[in-house]
Amino acid sequence: MTHIPPPAEELRLLDTELRRLDARRAQLLARRAWLITALQQARPLAAAAPQPVAPVAPRREATAPGVQNVLLLLGGVLLTVAAMVFTLVSWGHLGIVGRSAVLGAVTLAVLAAPVALLRRSLRSTAEAVAGLGLALTVLDAYALHEAAFRGSDGSTYLAVCTTVLALLWTAYGTALGVLRLPRPAALVVAQFPVPLWVAAAAGGLWPVAAGVLLTAGFDVVVGLRGSARPVRLTAVVCGIGSGAWGVLAAGVLALEASGPAGAGRAAVLFVLAAAIAVAAAWFSPRSDAAQVVAAAGGLLVVAGAGGVLRVTVSDAWLMPALLVCGIALLAVVRVPEAVRGGLGVASAVVQGLALLSALPAVAATVLGPLGRIGDVWSGTPVDARDAATLGGVWPSGAETAPLVLALVAAVLVVRGGVWRQWVLPPAWAAVVVLPAALHLPYAVGLSVQGLAVAGLLAAATATAPVASWLAVVTSVAVAFVSLATEAATLTVLAVLTALFAAAARQGRHAPVTAAVSLGYATALAGAAGAAAGWRPEHVALLVLVVPVTAALLAPRIIDPATVLAVEITGAVAGAVAIGLAVFDAPLLALVLALCGVIAAGTAIRPDRRGAGYAAAVLFVPATWVRLAAWQVDLVEAYTLPVTVPALAVGFLRRHRDPAVSSWAAYGAGLAATLLPSLAAVRHDPEWLRPLLLGTAALLVTLLGARHRLQAPLMLGGAVLVLVALHELAPYLVQMADALPRWVPPALAGLLLLGVGATYEQRLRDVRRVREVLGRMG
């Protein structure tokens, strides 16, 4: 019978079994966690273990076909050289006829060998043997000349030989179509027949150049219509070479031409080369290459026209005429897009060269007036050119520079789009150069350039920032030009000041225009003072109006960049005023003090508290200069004006921030007076300065001890001790002379014994003093 325990006993048994299961589960989970951790630590070690490196086969630096081709090429070259030496040198016992016969037979055999090689699929070997055969045909031609045509004309024989060789090689390559060498070689030889036939028939550079260009045209046709890629590439290279040679010959003829007839003959060659280039671009399948070739063709047309214009128009009008030819390229229509783009590039190149030709005139107009700084108010110039160059040399042919610049600007306007944003520089240059180029009167030149400044400032917007800078450049030039006369200087500077101030008020690049306006105001103040006959130090007082104006305007300006520009310009004007007054001490002191007042007024603004330091720096030298002007030689008179405000500032700083160190608050102010006075005590035989300095040092020391401040305590105590030693030094010297010589060593020994005996107590005292000083501010 099954024993069934009572319910209470059965519940106890079940609880016991469950507790055992929970304990076993916890044990198994702990073991599982340990195993996972062990496996995770073992994986990095296994990954870091060195893996067996498989042997790497040596890298092949050349492929098998490459090695084969190199060997075949070297073999063919060596055989060709051997054949040449054998033909020209080694057959001493045979005549030229025998050598020619043997060489002809060998040539036929070598040319026939590639047929058998191609049947065995030895294509590379067949190429090498075919190359050797082609070289042997050239030797055959030489042998034939030596054997039968020694007395013939050289040009004619070369023309016949190159014609025959080109035809034979072409036929040979066509018959053996698999070979890639014969037809490109035939095309290379085909470059010579036409020029040689022309040279043999007529002679002269022009016919030969025409023959070379016709050959280049033939190369273009082959390059565009050829079926094999090697032939097309060879045709392109040969076409470029022949075309370049023909163009070079045309250039030589154009430079040598002394009249329209010779220049016209050279122009025909240029036009022929241009026609070939444009035709190549027209039918070229690649748009990028077509654009480049079409650009070259357009430049060739302009070059041809330039050769004719060089001998028919004056030097001054040559560049405008060439520019018109370049602009005419833009009028070509009903051509492929790539050709039109290439002609546009050629026109842009011509326009760029035209701009470069006008640069000397622009530079002379803008930079030439800078030399007038050493020739101020010397008198009214003859005209605008004399004012710009100071009577110097005007660039040759620059009379038409305004026309060139205006034409370029007009083209940019007509083309529109992105080109229109580049209109302003050439248009500005045309206006600036115009008065000097046309010999306009001096006053008219000033007016034109002044109007140019006004127009540029009116055109200056956020999208055209270059206008502001051009206005600045123009204004500098017109300001220097105005230095010729007193009235012109004052008028121009006043107008420029007003123009730039108005532009700044309208927000047209205000940082630049505001700064320039204040700069011209500074120059106007200096010029007005000089016109009134004032000395430079008195003019400095007038110049100070500009810093005052800048300090008053800055708080009313919203843009931070403009504020900074105005303040910097005002500071520069203040520096100019100081420089003007440097040779008069009383006025220099006044100017420095006024600059300090301006800086102090600026420091009132919350965002310009740092200007207070500048004010202090200005007030101190102002005081010093004034004292020097009064011939005051007391050191304290120079140092106390620094110490008093420095200590006041330090006191306010400590009052606002008690954590500030006493060295930072009072150290510089105390040192400014105590140290120079201490140095002066050494050379002062009187008793008053040491007494006053010692008293002051004692008071400073007591104040430092009272308020527990390191800087007053240390500086005052050190100065007090040094002053006392200085005053007691004579008596110490007398006492040292009166004592026997054994007394100082004995006293030193006793001192060392005493220190050694109380060493520990002395260290404790030193630490206590250091702690006391450390607790001070």
Image (cartoon, rainbow, N blue to C red):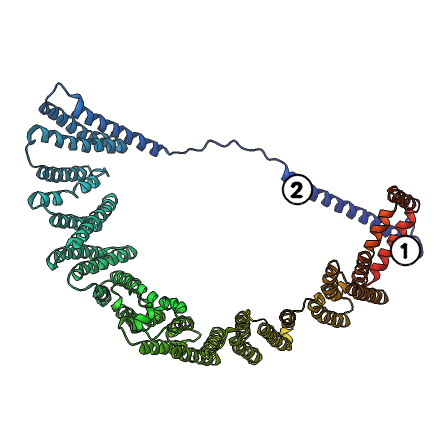
In the drawing, does residue 403 fall left or right of residue 7?
A: left
What type is the residue that disc 1 sits on?
A: Leu
Q: Can see residue 4?
A: yes
Query: Do residues under tags 2 and 1 come within 8 Å of each other at their CB atoms?
Result: no
**In the visual, does 256 lie left or right of 769?**
left
**Residue for point 16% across, 57% down:** 271
Q: Earlier in the sequence, mark 2 or mark 1?
A: 1
> Which residue in the structure is indicated by mark 2?
44
Q: Quadrant of residue 110?
A: top left
Up-down relation of residue 649 to residue 684 (above or below): below
Q: Is residue 512 left or right of residue 20?
A: left
Q: Residues within 10 Å of mark 1 (few under 14, many from 20)?
A: few
**Furthest residue to the top?**
93
Foreground tag (2 vs 1): 2
The answer to whether residue 561 is seen in the rendering is no
> Does dot 2 land on a helix, a strand or a loop?
helix
Residue denoted by label 1: 11
